[in-house]
Image: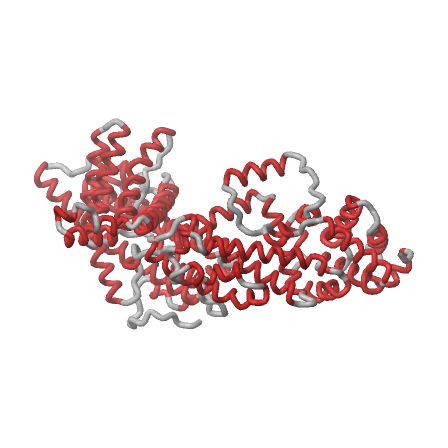
Amino acid sequence: MPPTEELVAILGAGGLRAAPRLAELLARLDPDAPHEAQLAALEELGRFVVAGPTQPGVAVQGLARLELVVVALERVPEARERFAATLQAIARQMRAVKLFGEVGLPNERGLWAETTDRLARRFLPEAPRTHELAWLVGRIVRRQSDLAWLGPAADPLLERLAAVAPWQVFRSSVLDAITLIATRIAALGTGEALRARSETQTVRDSTLYAVGAAPLDQLPSLIEPARRHLAHIHHALEHAGVSIDVVYSLDSIERGLSRLEILLALVADDRPSYAIRSVIAAAGNGLLGLRSFRQLVGDNTRLLARKVIERTGRSGEHYVTSSRREYWSMFRSAIGGGAVIVPLTICKFLIKWGHFVPFLDAVLASVAYCGAFLVMQLLHLTLATKQPSMTAAALAGSIHARPGPHQLDELVLLIARIARSQFAAIVGNIITVVAVALGFDLIYRQLTGASFLDPADAIASAESLDPLGSWTIVLAALTGVQLWISSLCAGWFENWIVYRRIPEAIEHHRLARRFGAARMARVARFLERQAAGFGGSISLGLLFGFLPQLGHFFGISLDGRHITITTTSLVLSASSAGIEGLGPDTFLWGCLGLVTVALCNFGVSFALALVVALRAREVPAEAQRRIPAALLRRFLRRPLEFFVPPRSDDPSPTAH
């Protein structure tokens, strides 16, 4: 090896600070040294690149240090020979299949097993695995910042590195990894979970099976057909339902195909700089993920989110209006829904005044809520702020399926449609609630000589809506969470009904001999159409009924604030005590509380649905950050579009 001064002259001014350290590291590369010493030398050289000495005036330190290493290998024959021989010696004694074919890809270990394994890695000393290349790379890449230099700007340097480094020594391991991934894709793709949703008639006809059986030179041509096969399975989920096994299999196959593309490019090109960068990024991020609890939770929540929205169902289509005809139809159905809310609110007061034991109170309240929501469903009426799960999938899909400069156009248009649909529902509900509540209190006063609420109850009810003097904002946001959870339950129950083929089982049940095949078929179709509504209505009723009693158990108030129910309470309070009896300030603060409740109900449920959908579709963070600005531009340009539909019935988005 040349002296340090000579190496500085070779590296140029950029190597003034790093040259002594680099000279020392290159001198330690010795193909005749013990295996552990070779690993230590290569680890320190890798750490020099990802986290070595800084150079003044350099923006990307890792790239600058990588360039020093490449220049040294190009211009110093002794260093190049030492590096190549040491790398070959290490490759002969280490297994690399796990690094290329398993790290960063989904595995079949459960959440509990992964959690305990990561806890052990974090708090217990780890025995060295000197014959596993993944262990060595994990010793080099220790934190996310170690990969900060790994961008497109690194490609020229990686191409130069590939020209002087014998990276082909890992070719055999890469080929084994390709075989391993292809075999796993074939096994998952021909399993019962996906086979039942495939368009192929036999296992041998499956493109995913062909991926596992094809020779290396035919694999690149099978990637796109395999993705089209997956797209057909995705479409079939709408009719066949989805389970967590299906979601896991689809996710594993999709990620396996992406890894295959990288590895195939690595072995097909003599100087594959982009493939090398992709492999380093995949392996590095995968190794970091193996040590990260955040990554573990994120991966599992992403799979659960995909299960939630993978099958969108038909449960919420009527909650999003495109034309004026649909808009006014929504408004009319909301008027009918408001008429059901008043009796529900009256029942709620009666149950409260009954002073029942907590469990019976929760049961009676749940029955009242569930009954009212089911009546609205069966009569095709609308309750404001319901946020169906299919809306979230449509929102995320509008980003996922339309890349480019106008990627957010369809999303913003969908948000505008949802906003005006919910506006129509809220206005329709409130108009009816006000009229029916006033009429009820008038009739009640005529029959009994007193208002439904006494002055004390009226004042207490109105004061509970003060957005600043009570927990109204928190409880309204909690109601938004409950609305969102009920939408998940609606999608889950509909999916469960379809996945288990319950309608078909009912249609062909032996009771058809007694009641007739046509009647059983009608029952089956009715259940299939109403399954989502049943799941959402019953779950929301149980949440509204039992959660307040759970709060009482812990000494906190969890009595939700829904816009229609709180409006009924305020109208009955004003009708009973009068505005003067309530106090003008109390009444005005109550009205402001209603606005706050409406915004929290809709905003929280909508935000949660959108976050889950974006997470499930893995929408890039950059696109997510652009959503608020795009939405604001649309609102400033066409504010009325968020409240009433345009005259045209054409639902196509307008380009920005």
Residue at screen point 9% across, 36% down: 448
Say how the picture is coloured: secondary structure
Please give left or right for residue 312 compared with residue 28 in the image. left
Which residue is at the front of the view, 572 or 194? 194
- The extreme left residue here reads 447
**Is residue 483 among what the camera can see?**
no
Residue at screen point 27% across, 33% down: 362
Residue 344 placed where, x, y %? Answer: 21, 42
Quadrant housing residue 555: top left
Residue at screen point 26% across, 27% down: 357
Which residue is at the front of the view, 482 or 25? 25
Residue 439 placed where, x, y %? Answer: 14, 47
Which residue is at the front of the view, 177 or 297? 177
Please give left or right for residue 283 compared with residue 337 in the image. right
Quadrant housing residue 166: bottom right
Quadrant housing residue 479: top left
Residue 121 placed where, x, y %? Answer: 62, 38
Number of numbered markers = 0
Please give left or right for residue 508 compared with residue 119 in the image. left
Please give left or right for residue 639 compared with residue 214 in the image. left
Residue at screen point 69% across, 67% down: 270
Q: Look at the image and tell me in which quarter the N terminus lies.
A: bottom right
- The extreme top residue here reads 357
**Is residue 351 among what the camera can see?**
yes
Residue 257 placed where, x, y %? Answer: 53, 60
Q: Look at the image and tell me in which quarter the C terminus lies.
A: bottom left
